[in-house]
Image (cartoon, rainbow, N blue to C red):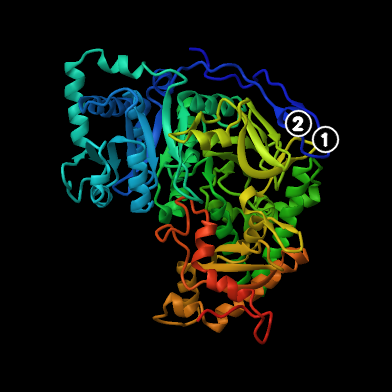
């Protein structure tokens, strides 16, 4: 059989430089690839099943152990569910929503929808009832896969607003079947009966879709306003597989661990890459099991978001410095050695025998223990979602852990730009993948063009026209620049950039990222200062970490609202703010700040399901606190504004 992808595609790169940001056509970094060999997701999937039927496709937890599913077994289960959907009367183009955390059944259901010639609408399981109901109504979902009875009851509570909803299917029916819901086993049984009664029906339906047909409605998490349905045809997904596959970055010998939310395109791309490139994926979306699963699964790569590294970084430092003077000294020595080696390797400089000997000692004493937490076989992490602090990439590189930061949007089917192991420039998001063009608007806004770009927002022609121009350029809303080597750097979201009353521009994510690096106590930070004399910050502490800190301090039966007022906590945060300010320009430094009385959460509408801060919501909710920070300073002007 022909190989899926050539590891040495015929690529071209063309780039011209200018000191400013000209029109899209005059400054671009472009790559080209051959057309895709497949017509649709089902076409790609069954080609994989034919090529390696008995190879492992997915691993999933069952009865406290990991169970493997081959591609042949996966295809059998997908066929049953797809036929089950057809037995319910699903027609070509009908919407099927999935409201569930990341688990094997999510993937099987998604593939079944594609094979039934339907369209998957993705919904975060932590979305508010209002957002969930909006997405189900907006997408006109005829069938909904819900994770369990609790999720089903949330959906049924608003069923009057869902006229298109005909069937509700539960992944986990152990707690019963509310209303007229059915279990996944019930749907599979219906599918087997339908398949027997309609010979050739499944094959005809699974082969019906073409590259331009809609495959997915991926709803953005909505930092401002309602979620928007991003229309992604089959060809967007095929492009991602072909383009990333052509890089030679991943292959059949890899093993992926997947916990990212599958309601987001980043998680979905992880799945489709496994199908196209033939590597198995271990699936478990429970965040409290990540550390345990990494040690058990021993993956070769993991796709992550920066918050994971922020927490690990803070924990490693905290444990090293809390182990006494000797342990702290050994850690600092090892970190210095590791950093020097990592920088030399990054820059292509020689690592001499004396330095290598010291690195091996540092590895035995410190670094190897950290890497063991990731299973011991990890080749690299692929990081995306929001900007990753440059310091984090260097810190983990010192430990022998490679982080490949990338960039993309729901509107561009996730990955469009990525660092590579041999071209990993810290602080950048890398170079465009083959087939993606990158350019800039006059104000520095990043523009993207290529087959991975959406065809528009569902039912929003005006919004689509503002985001996609007539030449196919996607206006990302992000500000950035390319360096001489073609690596893209993201400054911030265009709408989030702060302009102080003194005319200085401040990138809030840069400052917020540095603050979150300081300690795991800080869960979120929001920099404020638009039109103001100086910048202030709202600091949200982690309930989990704050309660753990209280235990170590001997504080019993304490509540979060009380702890955030504790003078020891205030002093601790003050020191971290001062440390961050020491490395900032005066105009971007945090002059005053306040600890919020409650942690920012998805459930309260302050965070998106992908854990981005809804800035306008938080600023409005804590308007009085912000105004207080800009009031005439009370005695001790450098002190935080006390919440009363």
Q: Is residue 206 above or below residue 468?
A: above
Res 32 label: none
- Nearest the viewer among 156 and 626 is 626
- Position of residue 149 in the picture relative to residue 270 (left or right): left
Q: Position of residue 124 (x, y in %)?
A: 39, 47
Alpha carbon separation for disc pair 1 and 2: 7 Å
Q: Quadrant of residue 369?
A: bottom right
Residue at left 49%, top 33%? 461
Q: Quadrant of residue 331?
A: bottom right
Q: Farthest residue toward the front?
A: 462
Q: Is residue 297 above or below residue 8?
A: below
Q: Is residue 295 above or below residue 514?
A: above
Q: Report crowding for label 1: few under 14, some 14 to 19, many 20 or more residues within 10 A (C-alpha).
A: few
Residue at left 53%, top 58%? 616
Q: Tags 1 and 2 in contact by the CB under 8 Å rule? A: yes
Determine the secondary structure under disc 2: loop
Q: Position of residue 272 (x, y in %)?
A: 46, 31
Q: Position of residue 223 (x, y in %)?
A: 51, 51
Residue at left 35%, top 25%? 93
Q: Position of residue 548 (x, y in %)?
A: 47, 72
Q: Is residue 279 at all visible to an observer of this figure?
A: no
Residue at left 53%, top 40%? 300
Q: Is residue 334 at all visible to an observer of this figure?
A: yes
Q: Report crowding for label 2: few under 14, some 14 to 19, many 20 or more residues within 10 A (C-alpha).
A: many
Q: Earlier along the polypeptide chain: callout 1 or callout 2?
A: 1
Q: Which residue is mark 2?
A: 27
- Position of residue 168 in the picture relative to residue 608 (left or right): left
Res 18 label: 1
Determine the secondary structure under disc 1: loop
């Amino acid at each position: 059989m022909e190989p899926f992808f050539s590891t040495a595609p015929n690529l071209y790169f063309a780039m011209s430089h200018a000191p400013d940001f000209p029109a899209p056509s005059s400054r671009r970094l472009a790559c080209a690839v051959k057309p895709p060999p497949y017509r649709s997701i089902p076409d790609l999937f069954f080609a994989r099943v034919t090529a390696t039927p008995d190879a492992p496709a997915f691993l999933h937890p069952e009865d406290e152990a990991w169970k493997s599913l081959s591609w042949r077994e996966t295809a059998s289960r997908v066929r049953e569910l797809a036929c089950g959907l057809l037995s319910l009367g699903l027609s070509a183009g009908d919407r099927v929503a999935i409201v569930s955390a990341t688990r094997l059944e999510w993937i099987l259901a998604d593939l079944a929808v594609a094979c039934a010639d339907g369209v998957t609408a993705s919904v975060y399981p932590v979305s508010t009832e209002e957002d969930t109901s909006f997405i189900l109504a907006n997408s006109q979902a005829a069938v909904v896969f819900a994770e369990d009875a609790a999720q089903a009851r949330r959906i049924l509570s608003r069923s009057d607003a869902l006229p298109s909803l005909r069937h509700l299917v539960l992944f986990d029916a152990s707690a019963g079947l509310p209303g007229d819901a059915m279990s996944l086993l019930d749907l599979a049984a219906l599918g087997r009966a339908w398949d027997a009664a309609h010979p050739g029906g499944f094959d005809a339906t699974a082969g019906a879709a073409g590259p331009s047909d809609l495959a997915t409605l991926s709803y953005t998490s909505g930092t401002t306003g309602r979620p928007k349905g991003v229309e992604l045809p089959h060809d967007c997904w095929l492009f991602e597989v072909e383009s990333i596959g052509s890089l030679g970055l991943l292959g059949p010998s890899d093993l992926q661990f997947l916990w990212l939310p599958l309601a987001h395109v980043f998680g979905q791309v992880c799945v489709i890459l496994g199908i196209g490139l033939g590597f198995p994926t271990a699936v478990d979306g429970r965040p409290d099991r990540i550390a345990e699963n990494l040690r058990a699964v021993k993956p070769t790569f993991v796709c992550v978001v920066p918050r994971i590294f922020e927490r690990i970084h803070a924990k490693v430092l905290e444990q090293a410095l809390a182990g006494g003077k000797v342990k702290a000294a050994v850690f600092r020595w090892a970190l210095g050695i590791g950093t020097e080696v990592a920088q030399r390797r990054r820059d292509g400089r020689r690592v001499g025998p004396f330095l290598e000997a010291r690195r091996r000692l540092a590895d035995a004493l410190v670094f190897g223990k950290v890497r063991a937490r990731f299973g011991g076989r990890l080749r690299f992490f692929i990081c995306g979602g929001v900007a990753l602090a440059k310091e984090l990439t260097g810190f983990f590189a010192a430990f022998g852990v490679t982080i490949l930061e990338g960039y993309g949007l729901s509107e561009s089917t996730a990955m469009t730009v990525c660092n590579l192991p041999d071209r990993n420039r810290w602080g950048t998001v890398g170079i465009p993948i083959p087939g993606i063009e990158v350019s800039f608007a006059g104000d520095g806004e990043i523009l993207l063009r290529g087959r991975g770009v959406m065809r528009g927002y569902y039912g929003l022609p005006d919004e689509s026209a503002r985001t996609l121009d007539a030449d196919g350029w996607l206006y990302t809303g992000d500000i950035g620049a390319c360096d001489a080597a073609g690596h893209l750097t993201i400054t911030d979201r265009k709408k989030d950039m702060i302009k102080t009353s003194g005319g200085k521009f401040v990138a809030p994510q840069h400052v917020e990222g540095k603050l979150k690096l300081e300690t795991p106590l800080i869960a979120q930070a929001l920099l404020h200062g638009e039109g103001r004399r100086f910048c202030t910050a709202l600091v949200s502490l982690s309930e989990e970490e704050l309660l753990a800190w209280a235990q170590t301090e001997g504080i019993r039966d304490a509540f979060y609202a009380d702890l955030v007022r504790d003078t020891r906590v205030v002093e601790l945060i003050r020191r971290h703010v001062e440390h961050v300010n020491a490395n900032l320009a005066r105009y971007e430094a945090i002059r005053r700040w306040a600890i919020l009385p409650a942690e920012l959460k998805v459930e309260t509408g302050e965070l998106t399901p992908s854990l981005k801060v809804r800035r306008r919501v938080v600023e409005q909710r804590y308007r009085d606190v912000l105004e207080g920070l800009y009031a005439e300073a009370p005695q001790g002007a450098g002190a935080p504004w006390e919440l009363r």
